[in-house]
Image (cartoon, rainbow, N blue to C red):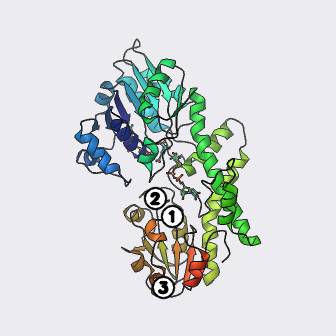
Amino acid sequence: MHNITVIGTGYVGLVSGTCFAEMGNRIICCDVNKDKIAMLQNGEIPIYEPGLKELVAKNVAENRLFFTSEIGEAIEDSDIIYIAVGTPMAENGEADMRYVKEVAKTIGKHLNTYKIIVNKSTVPVGTGELVRTIVANNRINERIHFDVVSNPEFLREGSAIADCMNMERAVIGATSDKAAKVIAKLHEPLKTKIFMTDLQSAEMIKYAANAFLATKISFINAIANLCERVGADVTQVSEGMGMDSRIGGKFLQAGIGYGGSCFPKDTFALAHMADQAGYDFTLLKSVISTNEAQPYVMLKKLQDLFGDYAGRRIAVLGLAFKPNTDDMRCAPSLVIIDELVKQGAIVQAYDPIAMPNARALLPAEVTYFDSVEAAVTDCDACLILTEWDEITGMDLASVRKLLKYPFLVDGRNCFSLQEMYEHGFVYHSVGRPA
Ligand code: NAD
Ligand code: UGA
């Protein structure tokens, strides 16, 4: 059993803190955002993540999970400190390190006993050393020692708890064997593979993994765009490609481009890191530009149906960047809906969970509905942007009846061409024949 403080109670801090508690440790989750902490203290969960509310409640009831905004006290009470604050994208594309630096300073000021400081945030190579310097320079007592470890997080939103509790590997980068062993032991209940490495390589593994997954997505989107021109079907192509275990079938679903709080910012940050190191990472830059162009491929399909959108009523089904999350950060729907509204379309939107977050980011002209059926009623066309179960399982016959015209543009390849033909839709999807 360890006493662990997790600093930053966002997606990663809250989920991993709760999972560490579930594994039998005593966890204090802390955050500068007092409203967030007050909500958690009241049993409310600030994000939508399946199963999280129940797991938080269980570990709070069993006295293993605590929430506070008294960060200094939490640090003093613990022997392991996890940093899980945001590293958003700065204007020039690099990772904005201000929160990590701030936390390192706070840790230094409250370093009352030996502690292991573990970085879970996604950070540029060299951050472990930077944290070491900041903590050392702010220490109250130079004789108190500490170690810095990198233990990046690989969970996905929407399946975060399962990803955490059944992780495929834990990457642990450290200069101190003693500290690395403590963090490895902490992961023992998970019976996962432990990959021990140096600090810098652990930091790079996280960016390389995200950039590689983003590359698979941009690659299959480019293949999809080509399939449309030469008469192939991308879903068949990715299935056939994926049967080769050297390629693997995952992350080969063509669509509207990757979004979310990580792939967009992390690909930019890695490209920036490469530029700074004097390496022009053109492959990665193409991944980014292919991704930025993909939402416009969808818009072009819609435009081809009408000529222009002015005065057209378009139902948009699905707003979140992927199903099972309310996260709207860098959702491709933002670009697509902005463009539709700019060109005079009337947008009727529906998402099972993300509408409250979407309202804050989408143009004020968008109207929101509380069901698929209500959103599609009297629309000239329907556009699918997120493959929620509720959307892939919608009643096609009733949607067809409620739409003014049978136009359906599907950015996620949710339906078979045959069933859409049978229901009488004019159906345009991604990388498949119309
Ligand atoms: P988030 O924005 O959801 O949460 C970050 C939290 O840190 C916020 O609640 C913020 O108030 C808090 N914070 C900021 N400064 C603080 C300070 N000085 N002291 C205490 N708290 C502070 O971010 P997130 O999505 O959890 O991501 C955190 C890190 O993990 C990022 O580096 C991200 O790239 C990485 N990551 C995220 C995911 C994901 O699915 N979201 C997955 C893997 C890795
Ligand atoms: C991603 C990684 O999968 C996690 O391992 C990582 O920890 C996390 O980023 C992070 O660093 O934050 P996440 O962004 O939650 O997780 O979601 P993914 O399931 O990876 O999807 C990202 C985007 O890619 C979504 O917009 C999704 O629709 C898109 N995608 C995914 C595709 O377009 N095609 C695919 O085949 C897979």
The residue where tag 1 is placed is: 334
The residue where tag 2 is placed is: 328
N-terminal-most mark, 3 or 2: 2
What amino acid type is highlighted by mark number 2?
Answer: Met
- The x, y position of residue 225, in whole percent, is 70, 66
Q: Rate crowding at label 1 as few (under 14), some (14 to 19) or many (20 or more) other CA atoms within 10 Å.
A: many
Q: Is residue 397 visible?
A: yes
- The x, y position of residue 157, in whole percent, is 46, 51
In this rendered view, identify the residue nearer to me: 419 or 146. Answer: 419
Label 1 to label 3: alpha-carbon separation? 23 Å
Find out whether the residues at labels 2 and 1 contact each other: C-beta distance under 8 Å.
yes
The residue where tag 3 is placed is: 403
Q: Rate crowding at label 3 as few (under 14), some (14 to 19) or many (20 or more) other CA atoms within 10 Å.
A: many
**Quadrant holding the N terminus:** top left
The mark lying in front, picked from 1 and 3, is 3
Is 255 located above or below residue 314 in the figure?
Answer: above
N-terminal-most mark, 1 or 3: 1
In the displayed structure, does residue 429 sit left or right of residue 145?
right
Residue sitting farthest toward the right: 230
Label 3 to label 2: alpha-carbon separation? 27 Å
Element class at badge 3: loop
Find out whether the residues at labels 1 and 3 contact each other: C-beta distance under 8 Å.
no
Residue at 45% from the left image edge and 80% from the top image edge: 376
What amino acid type is highlighted by mark number 3?
Answer: Leu
Element class at badge 1: helix
Snapshot quadrant of residue 223: bottom right
Residue sitting farthest toward the top: 143
Element class at badge 2: loop
- The x, y position of residue 429, in whole percent, is 61, 72
In the displayed structure, does residue 354 sit left or right of residue 198?
left
On residue 393, the disc is none
In this rendered view, identify the residue nearer to me: 106 or 353. Answer: 353
